[in-house]
Each structure stands twice: as C-alpha cells, then as structure tokens.
Amino acid sequence: MRVVVTGGAGFIGSHLCDALIRENHSVVCLDNLITGNLSNVEHLFGHDRFRFVKHDVTEYIHVPGEVDFVFHFASPASPVDFERIPIQILKVGALGTHKTLGLARAKGAGFLLASTSETYGDPLVHPQPETYWGNVNCVGIRGVYDEAKRFAEAMTMAYHRYHHINTHIVRIFNTYGPRMRPDDGRAIPAFISQALKNEPITVFGEGRQTRSFQYIDDLIRGILLLMESDEHLPVNIGNPNEYTILQLAEVIIELTGSKSEIVHRPLPPDDPKVRQPDIKKARERLGWEPVVPLREGLTKTIEWFKTHGV
C-alpha cells in the first residue's frame, strides 16, 4: 500500500513508519516538527519507499497520487505540552482530524486515529473497558488533550457513519521505548534521565497512583492488526500489568545501577489515580496481547538513552 502517517517523526509515528516500510508499504510521513524530531526518521531518508514532508496537518493536506491508508498520529501528547502549547493540541485534534479524514475520503483510503487512554480521564471504573465513557475535567489543564482526542474520536465515527469511510480508532495506553523525548514529562523518560545522571528521581504525590506500561513494539503490532481488521469502534491497546509509580522508580534505579534517591513533589491537577486497560476486545477481535515484559523493555529503553547522550 501507499500510506500517509501524520506525526511520523514523533516517538510512536516513527516506529510506525519503520514497521510499514518493513511490511513493504510506501510511506509519506507528514510532520511539522513541533514535537517530532527528524533524527527519528533520518535513517529512512534515501529509501525509495519513504518520503518526508514538513507540513502542519491543521492546514489543507495535498498528497499527489494514490493513497490507500491514512494514519493520523499527529499530536503533542506529553504532559509538559498541555500548558506549553495547548492551542496547537486542540487544533490538531479538531482541525487536523478533519483534514486527515478529508484526505482519506478524497483518496478512498482507510483511516486509523491514534486516540488515547486519556479519553477516560481520572477513571471511576477500573480497569477501563472501551464501553466506559470516562471522567474528564474539560476545563482542567489536561482537558486540552483529553477533549481534543474525544472530539477526534467523535469526528472519526461521524465520517465512518456518514461518509462510509473505513475507519479505526486505537486507544493507546502508556507506551515507552527508544526515541521518547527525555524532557516530555512522562514517568519513564524522566526517571531514566534522572537515574542515568544520579539525580533525585521526582515522584509526584506518594507514588501510589498506578499505570500500565507497554513497550513500543507491542503497540505497533496491535496497530497493524487493527488496521487490517473490520473493527470500527475504539479498541484499547495497552499492557494490563499494573505498577505504582513508586515501583517503577525503584525498578529503574535497579536496572540503571543508579545512586539516585527518590524525592516527592505535589501531585499535578487531575492526575489519574489509576490507569489499566481492559484488553478483552483486543484479544478477541485482533488476537493481540502484549508480550514484552517491563524489565526487558526498560533495559532496551535505558540502552537507547545511554547511547543518545542522556
């Protein structure tokens, strides 16, 4: 196929580009580099089936020639970005989704939206199934990302129902691996960066809040299975093994051999207390479940951070 990947120079988008190239597809990667980085895809430059275009997908998208599938992965997604570039986050969720769906419609292409577990907000149901509608503070700091993705899901389903576009929605739970931004505010890159420098590891609150962490390879495999499926409603892709933030910090200190001490800071507003995917639907509809253990994935991620100067 010939596919378009928006946000293709980002953490997840670049790994998706790699996988699609390995599957013998041709990839047009669109990214305005607001949070993406050319270093994530520069190894693909010169490949005859890869093309990079610097473009803001909130503007009209023109891709000459046939397009078989559109992956909409453009969006700042890091907590530090929620206050730094809130308008851009809202615009790419709304206008960017509209423009990319319009491209899919014009080309007669399939479409897959990268949504997020943040659509569940600070959940009152645990674990979170796709049928849960969420508990989101729409006027809170995190609301710019949560509501952008909820709107994007609604627009994707509208295009599916009204224009009969072959759409798919993946709700991505916490994912980690090589190419994460060290300063993106998420636990794993922050803890690894601090541990490798023997700096204090910053844990918000008491560290009892839980998260479920999946390695990037597991996520990409789930995305490709979803692309090939006939499932149009949202599907959770995440690792159901749950850890407290404090446990995560302790494991990273152990794996890095760090001398770092753990320090506690006030909990950010609307920080979810729990986050764990119900992946029954992914197992039944896609035959998917995660296979990379946390320690194995963290070891690979730590090695990448070491070799990239952190």
Image: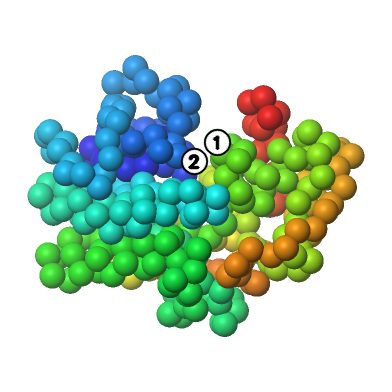
- Name the residue located 68 percent from the left edge and 30 percent from the top edge: 310
How far apart are labels 1 and 2 at the CA level? 5 Å
Q: Which mark is residue 162?
A: none
Kindly state the secondary structure of the residue where label 1 is placed: loop
Instruction: Identify the residue position indicated by label 2 in the image.
Output: 11
Q: Position of residue 108 (x, y in %)?
A: 12, 51
Q: Nearer the viewer, residue 229 or 35?
A: 35
Residue 4 visible? The answer is yes
Kindly state the secondary structure of the residue where label 2 is placed: helix
Residue 80 drawn above or below residue 212: above
Q: Amino acid at mark 2?
A: Phe
- Tell whether 166 sits left or right of 239: left
Q: Position of residue 145 (x, y in %)?
A: 43, 60
- Tell whether 103 sits left or right of 190: left
Q: Nearer the viewer, residue 258 or 292?
A: 258
Residue 19 drawn above or below residue 73: above
Q: Position of residue 75 (x, y in %)?
A: 39, 49
- Tell whether 38 sits left or right of 158: right
Q: Which mark is residue 179?
A: 1
- Name the residue located 26 percent from the left edge and 44 percent from the top edge: 57
Dot 2 crowding, Cα within 10 Å, few <14, some 14–19, many 20+: many
Residue 103 drawn above or below residue 301: below
Do labels 1 and 2 touch, CB within 8 Å? Answer: yes
Residue 5 visible? The answer is no
Q: Amino acid at mark 1?
A: Arg
Q: Position of residue 236 (x, y in %)?
A: 47, 66
Q: Quadrant of residue 162?
A: bottom left
> How many numbered discs sit on the rendered protein?
2
Which quadrant would the N terminus be assigned to in this image?
Answer: top left
Dot 1 crowding, Cα within 10 Å, few <14, some 14–19, many 20+: many
